[in-house]
Amino acid sequence: MDDDEAITRSLDGDLNAYEALVARYSALAHRTAYLLGAGDEAEDVVQEAFVKAFRHLPGFRRESPFRPWLLRIVANETHNLTRSRGRRAELALRLGAAADERAPDDPEGAAVATDRRARLLAAVRTLPERERQAVVCRYFLQLTEAETAQVLDCPVGTVKSSTHRGLARLREEVGNELA
């Protein structure tokens, strides 16, 4: 069942159809909340986002894709969480294990990869919020510029410039390993 059919059936009262959407996007929603600053509270953020998405499903514009719409709700819920904490949330990124092609029995290679990853994550954490969000959406969540703009509720041009500035800062901080 594709998203359109699941949405139509959900609007007709079929909870199993909405469960299909939850199952399809749950991991991505968790990753989004976690990467945007929810940290250990990502589960709560995602649960609230899916509840809000369900309540607002009748207002969903059917000509638009569901994924960016849902991720916008997740981003808003994450923002609400971090704002209510009264402090800046610590960004904790989980990178895929496939980032480095070294042999698994190469301790030196593993140490170098771990060091690079730690330096990159530390540098990402220091980016200004708008740049951090753009870089996380584009490169860690692998969203398009248009999807990132929808998730962050800003123009595509802002996504492009924020991503460009964020990557420039990361290159300066971490070096040309990112180039």
Image: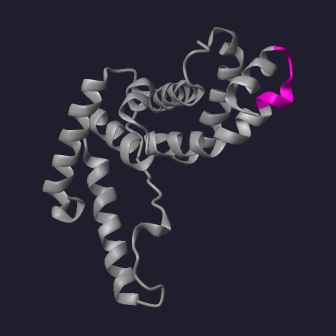
In the image shown, does 175 or 11 lie closer to the viewer?
11
Q: Position of residue 133 (x, y in %)?
A: 36, 37
Q: Position of residue 113 (x, y in %)?
A: 35, 74
In the picture, measured across the screen, residue 36 lies left or right of residue 60, that is left
Residue 108 in the image: above or below residue 67: below
In the picture, measured across the screen, residue 65 lies left or right of residue 120, that is right
What sort of colour scheme is used for the picture?
A: one colour
- The answer to which quarter of the image holds residue 59 is top right
In the image shown, does 144 or 42 lie closer to the viewer?
144
Q: Which residues are magenta?
A: 12-18
Residue 54 in the image: above or below residue 125: above
Q: Residue at x 68, y 33 (%)?
A: 47
Q: Residue at x 51, y 28 (%)?
A: 68
Quadrant position of the N terminus in the picture: top right
Circle count: 0
Q: Residue furthest top?
A: 59
Q: Residue at x 30, y 50 (%)?
A: 124
- The answer to which quarter of the image holds residue 152 is top left
Q: Position of residue 101 (x, y in %)?
A: 41, 76
Q: Position of residue 173 (x, y in %)?
A: 17, 57
Residue 44 magenta: no
In the picture, measured across the screen, residue 51 lies left or right of residue 78, that is right
Residue 15 magenta: yes
